Image (cartoon, helix red, strand yellow):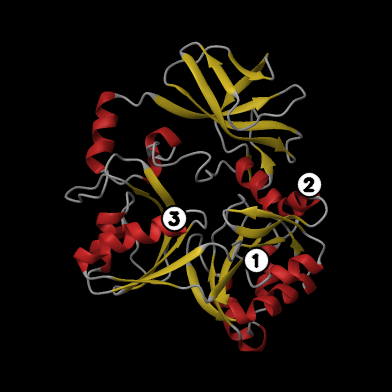
Amino acid sequence: MTEKTVLNATHRALGARMVDFGGWDMPINYGSQIEEHHAVRRDAGMFDVSHMTVIDLHGARTREFLRHLLANSVDKLKVQGKALYSCMLNENGGVIDDLIVYLFDEQHFRLVVNAGTRAKDLAWIERQAKTFDVEVKERPEFAMIAVQGPNARAKVLGLLHEVDRARIEKLGKFAAAAAQGPHGMPLFIARTGYTGEDGFEIILPAEHAVAWWEALAAAGVAPAGLGARDTLRLEAGMNLYGQDMDETVSPWEANLGWTIALDEGRNFIGRAALEKQKAEGVKRVMVGLVLDEKGVLRHEQKVLTANGEGEILSGSFAPTLNKAVAFARIPAGEPGDVRVDIRGREVPVRVVKYPFVRDGKPQEGI
């Protein structure tokens, strides 16, 4: 049975093209995916991300539990509202999921995990939490709307209660706080996102979601679907779970080494496997590819290098760049002249450092 967010009828009324996304009936676009992409890069767009799973953790040993559960160190969270991006690993160092964790207080932390991994994430977290006597509480009564783009923050701030505006305007990146929206609706506003643009991800009670979406639309925020979300995050160099990493891939192999905290005396799940892999030398690396000629780079295409074959992970036409880009996993070492097998034809590509786009602009050399 396909699940629906509280905004489903709103998307359909806007003429959205709907698709099954991880068991959810979600909008891929509202007409033009490319126009929606440009709206986010140039102004402000909004995404219904209510399919994401919100999990609240409660208990005296919650921080201790998260030290054990996550590869990144939750000890970086020192002040209320601060957020941290981390991978949650299995014993072999493979990625069960990537997530964001928020600190409310020492006995209350919040996780936001991916929709497609909801059941296995909850089962894994609940199993690990038992030892620490931590209560794991899913919050399906919440909706979530991401507002992204150079003008996104200003448009959201204009809709907040005047007593909250200055405080939310000062919110740093990867931090969150409570505020009131129109008619006092309670909002949890995080300065996070999945597009490479500034903006907010806003969690709110589902009964207010339609009114909040309509208020944003009236403020000039363009609805954007999952299609634009995918091209935006690819340009911004952000991994997609299931496509760029999974339980067979370690953070070292997914270019997520920066999310691993090998702090002293913290024995998190998967640490031994990660340390062993690093000591022996990581055999596969994730790189950015740019195709300068016409053509499209797609998931699972074969990548040919001097050290053997790799494959395309996420690949797409990048509207900001007007050319195709991709992430690929290839054997470690100097790759030489790299080609991609596109329908039996070996097409030359350039290996580049990503993100491909930062702050709305193509990076140098892309």
The residue type indicated by label 2 comes to Ile
Q: Secondary structure at mark 2?
A: helix
| Residue 158 in sight from this viewpoint | no
* Quadrant housing residue 94: top left
- Are the residues flagged by discs 2 and 1 in contact, CB closer than 8 Å? no
| Image spot of residue 199 (x, y percent) | 62, 61
Which label number is shown at residue 181?
none
Q: CA distance from mark 2 to mark 3?
A: 27 Å
- Using a 10 Å C-alpha cutoff, classify the residue at mark 2 as few (fewer than 14 neighbours), some (14 to 19) or many (20 or more): some
Q: CA distance from mark 2 to mark 1?
A: 22 Å
The residue type indicated by label 3 comes to Leu
- Using a 10 Å C-alpha cutoff, classify the residue at mark 1 as few (fewer than 14 neighbours), some (14 to 19) or many (20 or more): some
**Residue at image mark 3:** 99
Q: CA distance from mark 3 to mark 1?
A: 23 Å
Is tag 2's residue or tag 3's residue first in the polypeptide sequence? 2
**Which residue occupies the foreground of this view, 178 or 62?**
62
